[in-house]
Image: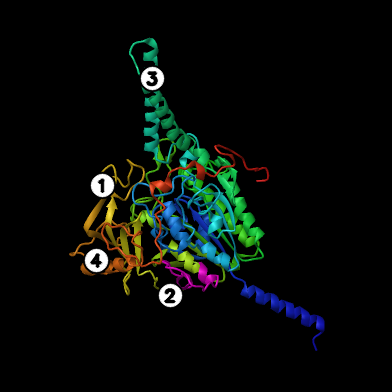
Amino acid sequence: MWSPVLAHVLFYLVLAAGDEVDRKPNFVLIMVDDLGIGDIGCYGNDTIRTPNIDRLAAEGVKLTQHIAAAPLCTPSRAAFMTGRYALRSGLGSTGRVQVLLFLGGSGGLPPSETTFAKRLQQQGYTTGLVGKWHLGVNCEQRGDHCHHPNQHGFSYFYGLPFSLFNDCVPGEGNDVLADLQHALRSLTMFLGVGLFTLVCVRMCGLLKVSLWILVVLFFASILATSVWYMPFKLLRTWNCILMRDQEVIEQPMTVETLPQRLLGEAQHFIKRNVDQPFLLFFSLAHVHTPLFKTPAFAGKSRHGRYGDNLEEVDWMIGKITETVDSLGLANNTLMYFTSDHGGHLEDADSITGQKGGWNSIYKGGKAMGAWEGGIRVPGIFRWPGKLDAGRIVDEPTSLMDLYPTLKYLAKDTKPDRQSDGYNLMPLLEGKAERSEHKFLFHYCGVNLNAVRWHPAGSDSVFKVHFFTPNFSPPGAGGCYDTKVCFCHGDLVTHHNPPLLYDLFHDPSESSPLTPDTEPRYAEILEQTAKAVEKHQNTLTHQQVSGDTHSESNSEAHSVQNQMTWEKILWRPWLQPCCGTFPFCGCKEDTKNI
């Protein structure tokens, strides 16, 4: 007969085992900024060392046709967070401005939107974002934090509410409206020189100059100086800041120590939540320019500073993986690795060389509309004991699929709004052979740029381009004259009939199909046209571009465009600040880092 002590021990062992079985999985999502799919070893690169990323792929599932919903940061990240095309959130651009440009603007991810973090938070998860946000902060006044990560389901935030960009490091050049900055600076100098000249002429008696003219010129000079100097000359102070939750802790931020601080915060978040289900979104500042110069990695790669930065990224991911594994969390943690879009081909100079990534055999890159190089990104899932090691999925998948996948794994069955993603688990587990994405729609701003169709019973993946960006200079492989491509007006070429490619046979999109080379040519155009009409019937009339397709108003409420000049431009009363505005400035205590 069992003793009472043995019976109690067995009871508690069974109880503990039951708790382990019932515990919801943890999620560690890792996103690199501007990473090219061809930069990673497991995706074909044999000259940049990425052993830790390659290990994730070897121990998990690699997606070869993983697609970003947009070729630029803000719209791609909005779609990733919400599982919906960015224009559903009002984050599709209508003109030149394609991403948020100022922290002191009022645009951002609307408070009415729902992110996967918010859904998981409602399921009892502790949620954290460490790194880049770039989806806005304030709406109407400093401190309302209506777009802030804390308002979108992240119980903890440490990082960059904006982004890392060249203006953050003196001497690296300008990214934000550089031509406008130059024009305003020239106007300020012209008015200043003109005022000084007229004052001298008047004082010397060479010419009778009205005092009113001098007064008008004086105030015009003051106004021009303010419009240029305040938002642009001090841009490093306004945009390059660090926040912990809703507090500005460093302004401007010290870029040199940023990688170590972000990594430390991510590791500490995991350790703090080892006994409860958690979601960590580790959104790296790498490999967006300006590139880091971390001494431990400087000059160590075969691809200059960009290669150094990528090998630093791989080391950081190795440290995160090591943290998960050392805490015994590996078998209950889904790890995911990706990029927000493709590499930036046009970013280079004579000193540093190539600053942007390599997009492998795929045409185009960051900000180049629907060309494959700007939207096909790495996609790696690792979950020991749950996902078979070494599995490769060649089916079309999307960054928007993370939202429904996380909901499914968190056992979230509550009603939700219109979604554009699908649960990936059947594909990842090998229980399904075909993607649920029969069609994928590729947007450039609010404009429907292209459509991808994967017909049933076929290996082919057809892509129909309605327009393409005009590369410059002519014959180049990107928009080198403007540094990024645009998707409006004379900066694009519309195609009638559309350009058609079969990505299965022509992944580089080098040979357009014709009625003579593709027997299904007419059917493909007909099917994609029907799919576009059906898709656009799910959009509000405010969301749809009026270029080529019908409009409708079937959603319950309209969405305000977050990418207008009114919402993008800097407003002093919305600017996050540590200290008394405009005397903003503080430094984080990094002694323990």
Rendering coords of residue 383 (x, y %): 55, 67
- Whether tag 4 and tag 1 are in contact, CB under 8 A, the answer is no
Indicate which label's residue lies in the foreground, 4 or 1.
1
The mark found on residue 534 in the picture is: none
For disc 3, the neighbor class at 10 Å (few under 14, some 14 to 19, many from 20) is few
Examine the rendered structure and indicate whether residue 361 appears above or below residue 529. Answer: above
Indicate which label's residue lies in the foreground, 3 or 2.
3
Examine the rendered structure and indicate whether residue 459 appears above or below residue 232. Answer: below
Rendering coords of residue 430 (x, y %): 46, 73
The mark found on residue 211 in the picture is: 3
**How far apart in space, not on screen, are marks 3 and 1 (Cα)?**
46 Å
Q: Residue at x 36, y 22 (%)?
A: 213
- Whether tag 3 and tag 1 are in contact, CB under 8 A, the answer is no
**How far apart in space, not on screen, are marks 4 and 1 (Cα)?**
25 Å
The mark found on residue 525 in the picture is: 4
Q: How many marks?
A: 4
Examine the rendered structure and indicate whether residue 486 appears above or below residue 252. Answer: below
Q: Is residue 489 magenta?
A: no
Task: Examine the residues drawn in magenta and state their main secondary structure.
Answer: loop
Q: Residue at x 26, y 66 (%)?
A: 529
Would you identify the image quadrant in which residue 322 lies? bottom right
Q: Nearer the viewer, residue 64 or 521?
A: 521
- Whether tag 2 and tag 1 are in contact, CB under 8 A, the answer is no
For disc 2, the neighbor class at 10 Å (few under 14, some 14 to 19, many from 20) is few
Sequence-earlier tag: 4 or 2: 2
Which residue is identified by label 2? Answer: 432
Which residue is identified by label 1? Answer: 490
**How far apart in space, not on screen, are marks 2 and 1 (Cα)?**
44 Å
Is residue 493 rendered to the left or right of residue 198?
A: left
Sequence-earlier tag: 4 or 1: 1
Disc 3 residue type (three-letter): Leu
